[in-house]
Amino acid sequence: MASSVANQISFSGLNIEYYDLALVAQTFFFGTYSVLIVLSTRMLLRGLKTRMDHVLFVIPLLMYTLSAAYWAYSVALGADRMRNYIKDVLSPADFSGDHTPVTKWNPLFNSLVLVNYVCSDAVVVWRAWIIASTLASRNYRKYLYITCFFLVLTFFSVTGTIVFQIIGVVEFPLYPIPPNSYLTYGTNVLQTMNLVFSLISNLIATAILAVAAFRHRKILRAALAEDKKSTKSEKILMLLVESGALYCISTGITMVAGLIRLPAAGTLGDLYTPVNIQIAVRILFSSDLQSGIRIHY
């Protein structure tokens, strides 16, 4: 019995080490995102002329608010895990595991922050739709409908994940959700689905932007509030393509990380997903900020 408790405490310590490393990376990307928000808010407020400008300004702020709440909870979770670990080390006989009033909310917070995936995907798809719609090409519209379809699937898979986690908090308020529970299985399936759907949606949207940037530069200049004699339009398009590509790469890394088991428990994806969420919103906002894009209907 004593050996079993010692092993569990050892695994808890190893999990804390992994978690702290991931938290440092998450804090770095959240910090850069915060700097962008602080430095750009006043500048962006000056450019709010249309209703769509206001919408595109509010969405990143809402995403930042959700990211900030998630980061704050992540810090509190790390502190709670460390406190609980120290207590278990000092009093092994009273070993209580890592399910506390703070940690029990972790699955729900992890699912709520997935809303940022949906928002990021929606903005990327919207960019592709506005730019490609100026081409009046049925072929482009066909692919746009496909990416919108996967965007809707992403929304429903994220919604399902949140619902499952709410049920989990209600049904298991004092203990972790059992591994063989339908909630655990359903959550794993839905989380995998939202990553796959999100990646497909972004790949198609980014591909549309890339093709548009290389084949229809003159037509696309007419859709941007830029001087046609300037090369800034091409730079904006390439920036959007590059940001979309980075987003897809980061999401792909998350999927691969989910297949790598950690020595203690869980997968590398459990640690990288919070980082990927911060990366996603940072890439999205920084591309908008650097390009200063204003697309007209």
Image: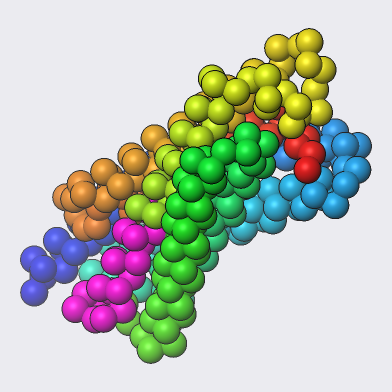
The residue lying toward the viewer, choosing from 229 and 279, is 229
Q: Position of residue 274 (x, y in %)?
A: 45, 50
132 above or below 111? Answer: above
- Would residue 242 be found to the left or right of residue 52 on screen? left
The residue lying toward the viewer, choosing from 267 and 43, is 43
The residue that appears at 88% across and 43% down in the rendered structure is 48
Q: Residue furthest bottom?
A: 171
Q: Position of residue 120 (x, y in %)?
A: 57, 48
The residue that appears at 36% across and 85% down in the rendered structure is 172
Examine the image and state in which quarter residue 165 appears: bottom left
Residue 134 visible: yes
Region in magenta:
177-195
The residue lying toward the viewer, choosing from 255 and 15, is 255
The residue that appears at 70% across and 12% down in the rendered structure is 231
Q: Where is residue 90 in the image (x, y as percent from the top left)?
A: 30, 64
179 above or below 204? Answer: below
The residue lying toward the viewer, choosing from 277 and 289, is 289
Examine the image and state in which quarter residue 220 appears: top right
Q: What secondary structure prevails in the magenta region?
A: helix
- Would residue 164 be found to the left or right of residue 42 on screen? left
Residue 182 inside the magenta-drawn segment: yes
Q: Where is residue 209 in the image (x, y as percent from the top left)?
A: 54, 32
